[in-house]
Image (tube, rainbow, N blue to C red):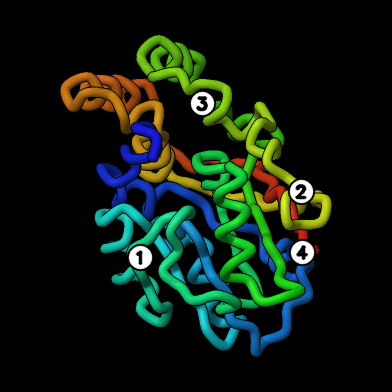
Amino acid sequence: MPELAESFGRTAEAYELGRPEYAEAAIDALGLPPDSVVLDLAAGTGKLTRQLVPRFARVVAVEPLEGMRAVLERVVPEAETLSGSADAIPLEDDAVDAVFVAEAFHWFASAATLAELARVLRPPGTLAILFNHADRDFEPPLPEAFWEAYRAAAIQKPPEQTVSSGLWKTPFPGPFEALFEESFPNPVELDRAQVLAQASSWSMIAALPEAERAALLAQLGELLPDGVYRHPLRTDLYRTRLR
């Protein structure tokens, strides 16, 4: 697992407080029946898991980081939570009807991952990859000084670990059909504490040495006025099925 991805284990509570859920319409678009057995891979603190539980007969959540998994088990006790990773999913062959990966596929995109996903999916299993992205800046905008401080101190991701590079799509199609992309509005409102928690959970901040991380978060807190911030997000859905 990349070091940046491992840093999420240090910020599980902040991730839970500040990170958004996903557009319900994106899940609806898959057309999966209620009796489906589904896997939420790299489930984190269960931001997507909690949306899947009311919809499907059985939801298995697999998460490698102990800190994230502890929060997941607390907030979504209805799911079956397991320790595991994308290249070693602790399920039998043909175990699930669909695999969901929310905000994480770019960390482990590889031919080996696709082969492992194909192994646990029962034909014609569905793979759904979701990412939240901002249509525009926060409303009202965060101060420019906030972003300047962030850019000056945060770790920069290599291109292969960013969603925007599109390099995570390279292993496809493999055992799958071509990816089909859709996008759905997912606006959220965050208070000041939630904005700061979200910033704390960004891997580029979470992976900093503790003293640097604490100093940066203190600086960001000084720069962010109190208030409610609307974030005009969209949920991008990439879906495919086994060939």
- Checking the image for residue 142, the label placed there is 3
Q: Secondary structure at mark 3?
A: loop
The residues tagged by marks 1 and 3 sit, at their Cα atoms, a distance apart of 30 Å
> Residue 111, located in which quarter of the rendered image?
top right
Which residue lies under the disc numbered 2?
173
- Checking the image for residue 194, the label placed there is none
| Camera sees residue 226 | no
- Amino acid on which the number 3 mark rests in the picture: Leu
Q: Is residue 152 left or right of residue 28?
A: left
Q: Given this view, does label 3 or label 4 mark the residue nearer the observer?
A: 4
Q: Position of residue 93 (x, y in %)?
A: 55, 75
How crowded is the residue under tag 3: few (<14 C-alpha within 10 Å), some, or many (20+)? some
Q: Secondary structure at mark 2?
A: loop
Q: Is residue 65 left or right of residue 90?
A: left
Which residue lies under the disc numbered 4?
241
- Checking the image for residue 72, the label placed there is 1
Q: Position of residue 180 (x, y in %)?
A: 83, 52
User: Looking at the image, which residue is at 59% across and 67% down?
Assistant: 119
Q: Position of residue 147 (x, y in %)?
A: 47, 18
Contact between labelled residues 2 and 4, with CB atoms less than 8 Å apart: no
The residues tagged by marks 3 and 4 sit, at their Cα atoms, a distance apart of 40 Å
Q: Given this view, does label 1 or label 4 mark the residue nearer the observer?
A: 4
- Amino acid on which the number 2 mark rests in the picture: Pro
| Camera sees residue 221 | yes
Mark 3 and mark 4 lie on one chain; the one further toward the N terminus is 3
User: Looking at the image, which residue is at 48% across and 60% down?
Assistant: 47
Q: Given this view, does label 4 or label 2 mark the residue nearer the observer?
A: 2
- Amino acid on which the number 4 mark rests in the picture: Arg
Q: Secondary structure at mark 4?
A: strand
